Image: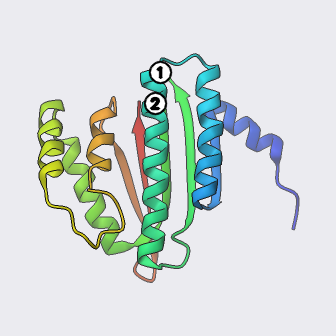
Amino acid sequence: MSSPDLYGLRERFEKDNILLCFNGPISRSLIEEIGNALKNYLKSEQLSPASALDVFAAYIELTQNIRHYATSSQLPGADTATVIVSHYDGCYSVAAGNIVRASDGRKLVERIESFANMDKAELKTAYKTQLRQPRDADAVTGAGLGLIDMARKSSKPMETTLKEIGNDTAYFSLSIKI
């Protein structure tokens, strides 16, 4: 096995304005450690507290969703996440992806695309409607508000892709602009 081209990777990161990149199995403690590094970076950039909080919240929501999905689905490889935070055109992008069951991915893409067709008022109504829904006592995750909240905070419609990779699995990715 040859050594990776770290300089080439560094050049790519600089070209794409990538501030943070992680690829590997995601755990609760790792989410926290990377989150701390992200907070420190955003603080050093003197980003407004509200914007820094939105970027951090998007990172937390995406990574925790991957972790919860991996735990509940027991799908091999679902816990391996790719997370990228970048900055360009005055906008921060938080993107994350992982392996999912293709059927789960299609449902998620459909749900996210429905948010893209909503304006801010409709997203607010959807959030309030979801907030009022009775919560399943057996649910291991939250009340289902995270995606709607991210759509509300995103400065552009969230972008999602689903790439079929075989054996009824796909690679799902979601990107949020703040």
* Residue at the front extreme of this rendering: 137
Q: Could you tell me if the residues under marks 2 and 1 are in contact, i.e. CB atoms within 8 Å?
A: yes
How much space separates mark 2 and mark 1, taking CA atoms?
6 Å
Residue bearing mark 1: 49
Residue 161 locus on image (x, y percent):
39, 55
Q: What amino acid does circle 2 point to?
A: Leu
Residue 85 locus on image (x, y percent):
56, 38
Q: Residues within 10 Å of mark 2 (few under 14, many from 20)?
A: some
Q: Residues within 10 Å of mark 1 (few under 14, many from 20)?
A: few
Q: Quadrant of the N terminus?
A: bottom right
Image-based side of 69 in relation to 156, left or right: right
Seen in the picture, residue 115 relative to 81 is either above or below; the reply is above
Residue bearing mark 2: 53
How is the model colour-coded?
A: rainbow
SS at badge 1: helix
Which residue is pictured at 61% across the width and 19% down the height? 45
Seen in the picture, residue 97 relative to 178 is either above or below; the reply is below
* Residue at the right extreme of this rendering: 2
Which residue is pictured at 18% across the width and 43% down the height? 127
Regarding residue 72, the answer to whether it shows in the image is yes
Choose top left, top right, bottom left or bottom right for residue 77: bottom right
Q: What amino acid does circle 1 point to?
A: Pro
Choose top left, top right, bottom left or bottom right for residue 40: top right
Residue 71 locus on image (x, y percent):
47, 72
From the viewer's side, name the closer residue of 172 and 154.
154
Seen in the picture, residue 144 relative to 55 is either above or below; the reply is below
Which residue is pictured at 22% across the width and 68% down the height? 136
Which residue is pictured at 35% across the width and 62% down the height? 141
